[in-house]
Amino acid sequence: MEDFSKLITVRRSHRRFTQEPVADEELRLILRAALLAPSSKGLHNCELTATRDKKVIGHLAQCKAQGADFVVEAPVVIAVVGNPEVGDMWVEDCSVAATMMLLQAEDLGLGACWVQVRERQDQEGRSAEDNVRRLLDIPQGRRVLCLIALGHKGMERKPQNEERLHWEKVNGLTG
Ligand SMILES: Cc1cc2nc3c(=O)[nH]c(=O)nc-3n(C[C@H](O)[C@H](O)[C@H](O)COP(=O)(O)O)c2cc1C
């Protein structure tokens, strides 16, 4: 898509996926988008672990009590991970990187959704971060911000409704 204004209007969270595989080149472009993200002090405090393993993805869908079930359908899941030892801006760096991946996915016509992991627990009260670290062999000191569930769209979604934008939250516009 050439028009960025249109891209950010049509991008929606997608939670239904077909089982058509995501091509390696498409996945590479999405991971590249994260690596191209702006970052605090240029430290790029964001590591990525991608998996296509159906069994692992099935367990990731249970990493927290609510809001991750749909992940089970995703052909690819990417964990977005920061390292507090590198710097204190890991949440910000990882958030920007995750957003870049959501936009690149949309640009490729793929569907994606952010799944919050940090500060979340599973049904038994265990840390969702611990669950994800264990499933993806992520070292203990690392922090897991979120998962990005990714795949070919299983259903279309309407673009954002221009009428419902919260312009009242914007101050300082003149004229
Ligand atoms: C910080 C953050 C956390 C989110 N966590 C989840 C989540 O755990 N599960 C989920 O299904 N969607 C999650 N989402 C997606 C939001 O629900 C979604 O962006 C919001 O409802 C607006 O819909 P849209 O993305 O289609 O514009 C999250 C989004 C953000 C930015």
Image (cartoon, rainbow, N blue to C red):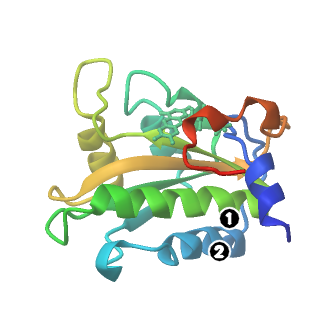
Write down which quadrant ligand 1 falls in. top right
43 shown above or below 172:
below
Question: Looking at the picture, how far across and down is residue 13, in whole percent?
Answer: 67, 40
Instruction: Give the crowd class for mark 2: few <14, some 14-19, many >=20 residues within 10 Å.
Output: some
Instruction: Decide: is 114 above or below 34.
Output: above
Q: Is any part of residue 111 visible from this angle?
A: yes
Left or right side of 123 for 175: right
- 173 or 157: nearer the viewer: 173
Amino acid under disc 2 = Leu
The residue lying toward the viewer, choosing from 63 and 167, is 167
Front one among 32 and 20:
32
Residue type at mark 1 is: Gln
- Mark 1 lies on residue: 104
Q: Quadrant of residue 52?
A: bottom right
- Residue at the far front in the pictured view: 175
Task: Tell me which residue sits at (32%, 72%) in the image.
Answer: 40
According to the image, label 2 marks what residue? 29
Query: Is 160 rendered above or below residue 64?
Result: below
At label 1, counting other C-alpha atoms closer than 10 Å, the crowd grade (few under 14, some 14-19, many 20 or more) is many
Give the SS element for disc 2. Answer: helix
Q: Which quadrant: the N terminus?
A: bottom right
Q: Is residue 63 above or below residue 109?
A: above
Which structural element holds mark 1? helix
In the rendered structure, find residue 123 and report the number of the disc placed on it.
none
Q: Residue at x 43, y 36 (%)?
A: 59
Identify the residue at horizontal 85%, vertical 37% (top origin).
Answer: 156
Res 50 seen here:
no
